[in-house]
């Protein structure tokens, strides 16, 4: 690194570059939704926003070892199992559509998850999917 | 249904057929491991074994809406996020290999999950993967 | 099975019979609430609705090994511990009343759960109970 | 309170009385197992042991609003759903037998829980039940 | 104890004293918010309210072994990890401010938690923090 | 960044520097234990090991916004609440001692956590603490 800024300094040129790259990955995958989440963190917890972009999207999502469709299937599994992740499910069901999963594959994935984490988690995730699909229909009727 | 047995009777001809079908799906996906789990339930909780076979594998895993590779990615996401599912991760990491995921894709999926459910869950699932891979190497050196 | 439809076909006569039986169990236990949940799945994830009815209620709830009061106590324990299951708690607190648990027994069960899953989960479940009791009072003042 | 000791002093006469009462409830319900857990806390975290006895058993378990059979059903639901509670499940499956639940009712409760928290949690709890039943058989062949 | 009331009787003089002490600790830590939660339990589950005050605050929070700033850091870690604890996070982020943690330390703690329980839980807790800080700004502009 | 390697390339000079820095933070905090965990990942999931070092320790742990004692209190809260994190609790109870928390403060933190995530989680974390303390006593008798 040419920069002499400490690694934790999220305003260093290195971290700015990492964040910028992460944001470009994020916008490929999630379109506008994900960016809105990060913007909303600028005042309250900018470092959290930085690491979502730089680490989660720049470092991990962009790795070549697994295609994006596969990453979204894993993500749907994790978020459904955790529960209480409605805002994140909303972003990632949108992302799943963006990277080529069909609505039917998404709801099938949620049914599949019910076997392992029970029906309530699958029902709640399906309810978020309903909202995302409806918004999409409203936007492109 | 031709049978007049109540639906909950796991020994009825209908349920026997459903269980037999589920067991064939299970053995396609998991080979011998899954069957061993079910055998171990015969004495203690046979109805639980029945529903794992008839429902989880016969009804759900076998549905055409999502290919098996995709189902295993969702399954890995759910089991990693839940934590405390080592025996099930063991079966389903084996199954992931059986349905065509590479070792690298499996460990990549666990790294990906870390973003959403934290490093401890990913580390513990990776530790199960190490054991499954080592067993496989021992069996086919 | 006389049907030659594949087991996963939720429109087969066998599965229709299983679903119909499950729905009758569901309506005995939950009255109208549970059915409304299933109706809302018809468009978005009909297979999930089928398996809630056919499997959860037709196969499991109706088993003779445990009376319905006992099943609702287990259910309250599970849903309270999971957290983030407000819609399901709403259905099953209503069901608990239907199968003969008193309001006092229900809130006592939630207090009891606090020992094992902590006060926040018990407080949140109690808050759902308050809503269900209030709705009941409004309906039958 | 006659004592002038602060409420948090677990060695005050008041707290000693509360702990002693809790221990008597615990030994009615769990026999020797629970007491062994508390003894093992004496060196490392005596206040945790005090509150398990005085609060969990003395204050809560002993309340009249729900009979012990019902309390154990809620407890089984919570512990199965939480996962990673093998030592506590061991104590409380033993307790469930002590307060009159049959082996069949206990395993039925675990199957029932699978609907709400998924098969892996039910399978792992069943595996603890198998150990508790086997120990009981060894002790009283 | 001079009282001959059973230990579980939350209206006994001993329990009234324990509850009163817990309420004074609660109001030191949480100001008015916590008390409002307890008031709301008076009708629906008074024993739950009693034990939150008498046990959680009177017995545990007031123990000398850990200062209040440290207790709030542990509490933030637990509530963030559990998820689905928005009302409790709201109370305890307010309490964290009351006992001397700065806004920056609180949001830093939530970022720190992301490493161990994943970004979704940290994002959701940060969203509650934003609301608490905004309310505080509205009250003292 | 002077490097033209893609951001996800964990062997690039930039990432090597980030990992090296993270490892130095890790060894300050955890001594030898944490490093052993990372070494064990070299064969199976080297990228997971990289991100534990570079992100978790290099990016986050080292941030100035919260002192290390405070970070360990949050960490203990999160790991206790998650459950099924024994290897991580072992590392971080050791780390807590290293950064200046006393044994009594650590066990007090686990008791405190019981209020929010229930006694079973606190009991299991205390059992890990007992092992860590005993190992320390064996090493420095």
Image: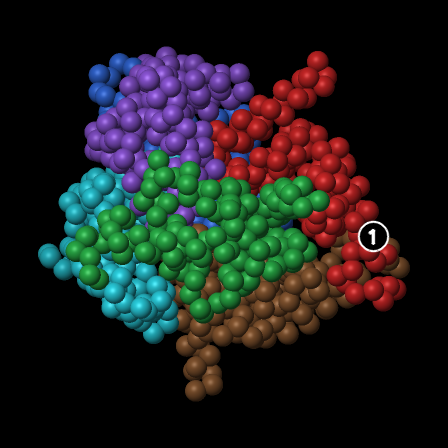
Chain colours: A green, B brown, C red, D blue, E purple, F cyan
Outermost residue, bottom side: B141
For residue F116, say whether it is visible.
yes
Residue situated in front as seen by the camera: A94 or A23: A23
In the rendered image, which quarter contains the C terminus of chain C? top right
Please tell me which residue is depicted at 54% across the width and 70% down the height of the picture. B96
Give the image quarter of residue A135: top right
Q: Chain of mark 1?
A: C
Q: Is residue D34 above or below residue B76?
A: above
Give the image quarter of residue A49: top left
Q: Is residue A48 left or right of residue C93?
A: left
Give the image quarter of residue B119: bottom left
Please tell me which residue is depicted at 48% across the width and 34% down the height of the picture. C121
x, y (%) of residue D130?
Answer: 52, 58
Please tell me which residue is depicted at 21% across the width and 62% down the height of the picture. A1
x, y (%) of residue A9?
Answer: 24, 49
x, y (%) of residue F135?
Answer: 20, 57
Q: Is residue D90 left or right of residue D114?
A: left
Looking at the rendered structure, the secondary structure element under dot 1 is helix
In the rendered image, which quarter contains the N terminus of chain C? bottom right
Q: Is residue B62 above or below residue D48?
A: below
Which class describes the residues within 10 Å of circle 1: few (<14), some (14-19), or many (20+)?
some
For residue D57, say whether it is visible.
no
The residue that label 1 is drawn on is C16
Please tell me which residue is depicted at 58% across the width and 68% down the height of the picture. B69
Q: Is residue A45 left or right of residue C12?
A: left
x, y (%) of residue B75?
Answer: 55, 60
């Amino acid at each position: 690194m040419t920069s002499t800024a400490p690694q934790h300094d999220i305003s260093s040129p290195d971290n700015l570059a990492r964040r910028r790259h992460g944001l470009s990955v994020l916008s490929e995958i999630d379109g506008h939704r994900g960016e809105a989440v990060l913007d909303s963190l600028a005042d309250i917890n900018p470092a959290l926003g930085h690491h979502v972009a730089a680490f989660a999207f720049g470092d991990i999502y962009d790795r070549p070892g697994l295609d994006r469709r596969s990453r979204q299937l894993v993500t749907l599994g994790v978020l459904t199992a955790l529960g209480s992740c409605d805002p994140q499910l909303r972003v990632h069901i949108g992302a799943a559509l963006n990277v080529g999963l069909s609505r039917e594959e998404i709801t099938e994935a949620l049914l599949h998850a019910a076997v392992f984490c029970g029906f309530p988690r699958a029902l709640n995730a399906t309810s978020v999917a309903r909202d995302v699909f409806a918004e999409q229909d409203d936007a492109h009727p």
